[in-house]
Image: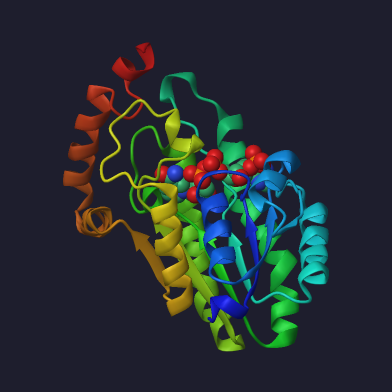
Amino acid sequence: MDIATARVWVTGASSGIGAALARELADRGARVAISARDAERLTAVAAGRMHVQPVDVTDRAATVAAGAAVREALGGLDLAVLNAGTWSQFHVEQWDSQAFADHLQVNLMGTVHSLEAVVPAMLAAGHGQIAGMASVAGYRGIPGSEAYGASKAALLNLLESLRASLGVRGIVVQTISPGFVRTPMTDRNRFPMPFMVEPEQAARSIADGIAKGKAEIVFPAPMMVAMKLARLVPVRPWTALTAVLARRGLHGGPANRAG
Ligand SMILES: NC(=O)c1ccc[n+]([C@@H]2O[C@H](COP(=O)([O-])OP(=O)(O)OC[C@H]3O[C@@H](n4cnc5c(N)ncnc54)[C@H](OP(=O)(O)O)[C@@H]3O)[C@@H](O)[C@H]2O)c1
């Protein structure tokens, strides 16, 4: 992917990683359209050099229409970065099924709606590139991450399936799995967040991975190694390890909730 000539749509670009990535791609010469719900914040991010297309990705029809509007504004679309997402800590003792539904609606169905907005036109063109925002939190079950982790695990699976089914039809599908990035999403967290990176650094890693067409964009390196190894840990030791975390209240156990 030649970013300097690319027409790009970034969702979830009103703050955090999406905003930093939109700026990074624009700096590298791309023509960029950005979406999220908050039009005012989008306009600030755009700074007059990006197309602003506000949308709530949980609204299927509106998201499909937004995709069409973006293609119209940019004269086509080469790359879609489907990044919109939400996170909140899950507490098993205050079971909240709505929290699960909200995570699935934004993180999973929001991505599915966005895919519907871009895949048919890319299939018709016979080319295109899609980078979906998952997370290393989807690699294994982590206490406190039940709703978020389940939504991201679903995305890891979905994007991996699409990598082949769309790949043979000319569309490159990439999975982005960051570790901790300092954004409004993580600013609320009260547990340790090892190997935290700044959004600008995350944006550079993602843009480099997009340019190289990498199947997986996982960063920072220490978190990638730790979580790839975590995937290999058998179920019993993983349960024992994460039970220690849960007991300490580091990820939503009783001690943490009291605070
Ligand atoms: N920060 C991390 O450590 C980390 C790690 C791994 C993965 N991620 C993933 O990276 C992505 C970006 O997160 P972030 O850390 O940059 O957090 P953030 O600053 O809170 O950004 C989330 C973005 O998603 C948008 N969004 C939320 N709900 C939406 C909806 N229904 N429709 C359209 N847009 C919506 C938000 O904008 P509006 O509120 O204006 O709609 C915002 O632009 C998420 O998918 C997150 O899961 C983050």
Judged left or right of residue 75, residue 143 is left
Q: Position of residue 37 (x, y in %)?
A: 72, 42
Q: Relative to the observer, which residue lies in front, 176 or 104?
A: 176
Judged left or right of residue 83, residue 218 is left
Please report the residue visible at 76 percent of the width from the left and 71 percent of the height from the top.
74
> Quarter containing ligand 1?
top right
Q: Relative to the observer, which residue lies in front, 38 or 41?
A: 41
Residue 104 visible within the image: no
Please report the residue visible at 26 percent of the width from the left and 46 percent of the height from the top.
195
Which residue is the extreme one toward the top? 258
Please report the residue visible at 47 percent of the width from the left and 67 percent of the height from the top.
207
123 in relation to 116, above or below: below
Residue 30 visible within the image: yes
Please report the residue visible at 52 percent of the width from the left and 45 percent of the height from the top.
16
Name the image quarter holding residue 93: top left
Q: Position of residue 78 (x, y in %)?
A: 65, 77
Quadrant showing the C terminus: top left
Q: Position of residue 201 (x, y in %)?
A: 39, 55
Q: Position of residue 170 (x, y in %)?
A: 60, 87
Name the image quarter holding residue 82: bottom right
